[in-house]
Amino acid sequence: MRFEEKLKKNSREALWKEYCGFLDLSLEDYMYIQRRLMEEQLALWANCPLGRTLLGSKSPRTIDELRAQLPLTSYADYADVLLPKRADMLPGEPAVWIQTTWEGGLRPIKLAPYTRGMLDTYRHNLIAAMMMATARKPGEFDLKRGDRILYGGAPLPYATGLMPSLFDEDIQFTWLPDANTHSDLSFSQRIKKGFAMAMGGGVDFFFGIGSVANYITESFGKSSGGHGSGLNISPGNAMRYARAKYISRRDGRAIVPGDVFRLKAFFYAGTDARCYKDRLTRAWGVAPVELAAGTESTCVGAEDWNRKGMVFFPDACFYEFIPEDEMRRSREDPDYLPRTCLMDEIRAGESYELVLSVLHGGAFMRYRIGDMYHCVSAGSGRLPRLSFVDRTPDVIDIAGFTRITAASVEEVIRLSRLDLGDWVLKKEFSQHDDPFLHLYLEIPPDAQAGETTTKSVLTEHLSLYFKYFDSDYGDLKKLLNMEPLEITILKYGTIAAYERQRGMPLPRINPGMLDLMGLLRQQEQPVRPEGRRRE
Amino acid sequence: MNSVPFLFINVVALCCFAVMFVTFLAAKKTREIWAFLAVLADCILWVGGAILMRMQMWPGLGFWYAVSLVALFSMELLFYIFVHVFTRQRGKFLLALFTLWTLASVPGTISGFYLPPPAPRLLADGSTVFIYTVSWHIIIPCCLFVAIICTTTLLLFRVMREQGPHSPGIQVIVIGGMVMLAGNLLQVTLPGNTFPFDALAGVVFAVLLMYALYRRRMFHMTLVVSRSLLTIALALICVTVSSYFIMPLKTFAEGRLGLNETASTTLVALAFAALLAVAYYLMRRLMEAMFTREEQQNRLVKKFSEEVAQSLSTAEIMEKVGMVIGGEVPAEQLYICLLENGAYKARYCTSPLATLSFSLSKDSPQISYLKEQDGYFFLREFCNNPRYLSVWESEKELFRRLNIDCVAAMRDGEEIVGLVLLSAKERSRSLNAAEIGFLQTVCSIASIAMKNAALYEKMFREARIDPLTDVYNYRFFVEQLEEQFGDCGKDCLTLLYIDADDFKLYNQLYGVGEGDKALCRIGEVLSRCVGQSGTVFRTSGKVFAILLPRQDTRRAQNLAQEIEQRVGEINLTPERRRLKPLSVSIGICSAPYAASSAKELMDNADLAVYNAKQGGKAQVVVFRAASELAFQQLAERTDAIVDRIEQGDGEYRNALSLISALTAAIDAKDHYTYAHSKNVARYAATLAVAAGLSDDQVRTIYAAGLLHDIGKISVPESILNKTGRLDEGEYHIMQDHVNNSIEMIRHLPEVDYLIPAALGHHERWDGKGYPRGIRGEEIPISARCLAIADVFDAMTTDRPYRKGLPLEYALDQIEQGAGSQFDPNMALMFVQLVRDHSIPVAAQTSIRS
């Protein structure tokens, strides 16, 4: 039965129980679901060619044996099977292949197979997320056929493009814009089109990654003066718009979307979404709901009406968590096998790297997805609440658009042909909470005189090659009007001197804040020019 | 207006309320039932008070008026309480507020402050009307009513929003409330009205509330309403309705239609009859819906219960469960799964073409959910439970494929021992309470019967199955042989003996464990080869038997060759390359061609397998009956047969050397015994030929005759040659020669097939012989031949302690011993053959005669 028929025939109590009943589960019952589904997945995966290849001579029969025998995996372990779409080697028949970029990978893209069971679970969990987001208390959700959704996600074959198709299987929403009829439009055109449609008939939900949502919101205020006149809107909406204009003038500020629209819920996801939370809340009048979703994982978690961290769905993936210290150790020593915790072992106040095994015939097993989560609350037998922190430190993700690794910086510097010395790159946030890349750079002594090495020239030069190397980087400027790169020139030899003092190498990507401060302090010390010139 | 309609309707309404109240008193009390009883009690007081007031009964109009009005003013509150309880609301504030408010208004009601008691006025036609005086005070209780009614409406609206309008019973309650409100409004707003709309609405209201409870499965209709009660109530309603229409119709027929007295009476009678017919039809439908179905179900349950109680077969019980549930509960298919080794395995389906290869784990969430439910669950309800999230894709797919929508448990105490899965027939219709009750009852009865039957089958199986090879054991073989021999009658029954070759050596080489594995492999091969066409048994350590009913020797021979081949294939497996190759010798005998009794069939097949062994092993030998003797002299025929032994032909090559060695040994020890053995062998072989035994049997008997006294080698010569009577000790030593013979032969594989004959030659037909004391046909036929020959030769030859007896005397003795010492047929045949000179007697004997 489709969800919209259930809305007519079933009581709200029954629907809430069916979709959001897991919120009331004890941690023990939650883990029972996790373990049981994982048993099925283990049996499927261990017996498929992909599983046998990764397991080698081992044959784990239980989850504990699997955790002991199978090291954590990365996309490189699956690339040979997934990129050529070798369905015969997978544990389940793929219904659709979803694509994303492969940061620092061997190829430009990653592909992830979705089985029918995964899609059903994905859809079920998305509806649950919508019910949780619109509820004011348990059971009182506000969802109906025809609700209008302003959609700021990328189209298929990206994971966000699946949402409209999945919802269509269960309930008819009005998508602003309709992904099928407007598939020829570029991403920014689609956003603009969606907003124009929203202005015409109102909007109930907003889906978007945080940075895009923020950009749209800010653009709304700036461009709102010109929008209303050109649109064929109903008298009711015109009245609403006029009222919004009045309120904004009365308060002496630009018009914000919340003046015009009354959203039931506002979903955002992606890196740095947290930075925009307060701004978006002020602008839309509702607190955005955080979703945890990914190409490899489907939708794994969502916030409820309390907005106090996400609860992970028990049936999407089997979750393991690497404690932060273990994660750092394993990043420094690739041979180190980090310890993992299960959902019933994580503790409030600590951060973890997420490791997941996709259930329902998915391909990924003990897969390091590269996301860090902070455990907001846990204990007393209740389900833990988590919030997304950032990507793992070896990858810098700016606003969910670009993913930069040490290798990609090296490549950009190489392409730029600039004579540069040692460097470290750190993701930092501006006073306005906007994320940016901060490159701490040394210039070799002979290059200091020979070339133009002012900060602005270097920034221009390197940005150009960042855009060339990573097209998503270009979108930051194009879509969000962001200038993400800032350069600080260090005295030549500072990094090497600091490493000597530290007694171990300094991570080139996202070193700790203390290290960075130490580096700046080091610069003030007199050092011999023993910097490292790039080969 | 007269007061007849008022009284009539009110009395009927009062009766209805009273009947409902009394019957619901017997129902199981829940909070909802208590709330409903309160509403009914209030209705009784309200309507009863009104009637008694009208009739101005003691203690007076004022009293009954107060009773009726207090009850009426309390109705809204009680309805609110009913809705509150029915929808399981928690808040008590409004409930307490309205209760206090209602209680506070009681004094004003009783005192007539709000509405004074009506004044009766006698009309000219003798009837009484009651005149009410309304003042503004009535607004005070009206505010209370409006507040309660609004709150109830809001509550119902909220419940419908939260639980959906389709929540069981909610719509009915809403309609009931509206009917009650409409009835009371009509009552007070229609000018000059005397028809009791309020009482009529009250009845409908009460019935609808009762239906709401029924929709929530809070009681069984048949628990509160009996067939006779319903009949009386319906008859009462019919009479009331009819009485209202008879007079107006008659007036209408005479006045408007202008019919005379007779015609109008006829018309009224016809109309009344038509009304009764319609009422009867409707009543029958109602009865059928309420009672007949349940009675039918009860009958089916009773019959089912009796049938399954008598059955000790789980398959038969499952079939009956399928039939009885399929007949009463709408389902496309019905599957039964039984708990075996931690999983519920499909064992039965109402469709013979359905696949039964699926199972459901005992740890699956469906089972844990079922344990929490009342013996059954509907899949759509389970889907609403968070536990459903842990269901495997394969399990979801299974339920989707089989279209299962209801699962019922067969319990043994707390444990679920079986599942009944129903696939949906009509997706839109859910099972009603009666069908669910029936399903649960059948499952309960079936689970007990299944438990007993399964226990019996387990014991039956354990008593008949060889635990090592998982084929039937010797005990069952003996039973089946007799049974199938009888069943086949004149039809063919073939027996195969399969003997593993050199198995003793195999065990010695690789140990008993490896030997057991080999036997298991052979057992598997036999089971696979035979399939459903016969039955495989393990009759002794290394010997298997196969019974093939209604299959002739040729088919058995083909099967035997296939078995030889498949056993040979066992040796090809890599893990067996280093082991001694396995092979089997197979003997075949078919009745009635080559055996006239089960015993004979067994013996002959045994003989055939021995011959296969003798013939070099790993071969198939078919036992063949004796050929025709009509045209051949008995002695010549016997010579021809036994010559093969004497000349050591073929398979007798090895045996000959042994027999020669042993007979030479006895000759050296005791020449008499040597000569005696030769005579006995010859007599017995000739008798066997004459008796129509096969050539193989004749040769066996001949060889056994030669060796039957080989045990005498161990008897001291002093005893053998003693001229006087043997003392008891000597006699025992002499008797032991039989066992000694067996001890010697048993270690010689080439001649061990002679044991049955040698062992039994001192047994007697009447069971008084030794060493085993067996009787009749239990004694192998070879031993029976030897016994006669042995006694005849012993009597007719000279012994150390006496001279040989006359031939005729010896024959007389044998005749006398027929039926006691000897097989009567064989004994008489032997005597006849000697007298006819068909059996040539030994030289010493013939001289004496």
Image (cartoon, coloured by chain):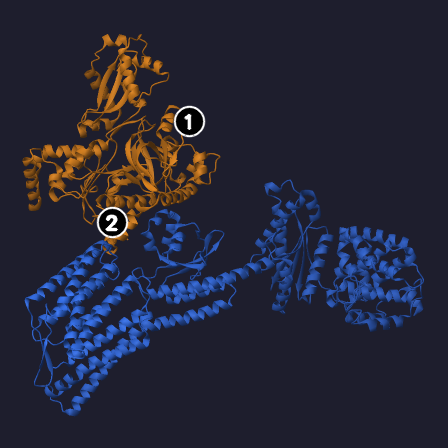
Chain colours: A orange, B blue
Q: Front-most of A454 and A87?
A: A454
Q: Could you tell me which chain the residue with mark 2 belongs to?
A: A
Disc 2 residue type (three-letter):
Gly
Residue A201: x, y in percent?
A: 12, 44
Could one spot residue B594 in this view of the protein?
no
Could one spot residue A151 in this view of the protein?
yes
Quarter of the image with the C terminus of chain B is: bottom right
| Mark 2–mark 1 distance (CA, rounded to whole Å) | 46 Å
Residue B480: x, y in percent?
A: 62, 63
**Residue B843 higher or lower than A456, as above or below:** below
Residue B9: x, y in percent?
A: 18, 77
Kindly identify which numbered label has been placed on residue A139.
2
Q: Could you tell me which chain the residue with mark 1 belongs to?
A: A
Say if mark 2 contacts mark 1, CB within 8 Å: no
Q: Categorize mark 1 by other alpha carbons within 10 Å: few (<14), some (14-19), many (20+).
A: few
Kindly identify which numbered label has been placed on residue A532.
none
- Can you identify the residue that label 1 sits on? A336
Q: Work out whether disc 2 and disc 1 sit on a shared chain.
A: yes
Disc 1 residue type (three-letter):
Tyr
**Residue A452 higher or lower than B117, as above or below:** above
Q: Front-most of B696 and A123?
A: A123
How many numbered marks does the figure carry? 2
Residue B388: x, y in percent?
A: 35, 49
Dot 1: element: loop
Q: Which of marks 2 and 1 is nearer the N terminus?
A: 2
**Residue B682 higher or lower than B618, as above or below:** below
Where is residue A512, by image quadrant? Answer: top left
Where is residue A413, by image quadrant? Answer: top left
- Answer with left or right where residue B165 lies relative to residue B435: left
Residue at image point 6% right, 44% down = A239
